[in-house]
Amino acid sequence: MIHHTWLNRPTIKKVTCVHTNAEKYVVNRVLTPGKTYDVKNETEEFYFIVDNTGKIGGFYKEYFKEA
């Protein structure tokens, strides 16, 4: 249940969104290209960040580069 405390956890690192061209999902509503986001958790495939809605979202790493 670690996901319940992600908003309060320290930021691991910062990443910058490079594109929102998703094949399957609509991410352009919650991500802005060029904006820097706080990473709260990371897996091999995903970054869990505080997105434009102010909530934690999991996104493929291909949308970002490290800031």
Image (cartoon, rainbow, N blue to C red):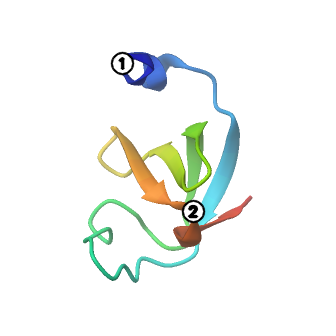
Viewer-proximal residue, 24 or 8?
A: 24
Question: Is the residue under label 1 in contact with that under label 2 (CB below 8 Å)?
Answer: no
Residue 12 left/right relative to 38:
right
Looking at this rendering, what residue extends furthest in the front direction? Answer: 44
Residue 17 against residue 49 in the figure, above or below: below
Residue 31 against residue 47 in the figure, above or below: below
Task: Tell me which amino acid carries mark 2.
Answer: Lys
Quarter of the rendering containing residue 15: bottom right
SS under mark 2: helix
Quarter of the rendering containing residue 5: top left
Residue 36 against residue 64 in the figure, above or below: above
Q: How many discs mark residues in the rendered view?
A: 2
Q: Residue at x 54, y 63 (%)?
A: 35
SS under mark 1: helix
Task: Tell me which amino acid carries mark 1.
Answer: His
In the rendering, at what x and y percent does residue 23 appear? Answer: 33, 82
Q: Residue at x 56, y 71 (%)?
A: 62
Residue 10 left/right relative to 51:
right
Quarter of the rendering containing residue 27: bottom left
In the rendering, at what x and y percent does residue 17 appear? Answer: 55, 67
Residue 48 against residue 46 in the figure, above or below: above
- Quadrant location, the N terminus: top left
Marks 2/1: CA distance?
A: 22 Å
Q: Which mark is residue 36?
A: none
In the rendering, at what x and y percent does residue 55 appear? Answer: 33, 38
Q: Residue at x 74, y 58 (%)?
A: 67
Which residue, given by chain and number where applicable, does mark 2 sit on?
Answer: 61
In the rendering, at what x and y percent does residue 20 appear? Answer: 42, 77
Q: Which mark is residue 4?
A: 1
> Circle 1: is it few (<14), some (14-19), or many (20+) Cα within 10 Å?
few
Mark nearer the N terminus (2 vs 1): 1
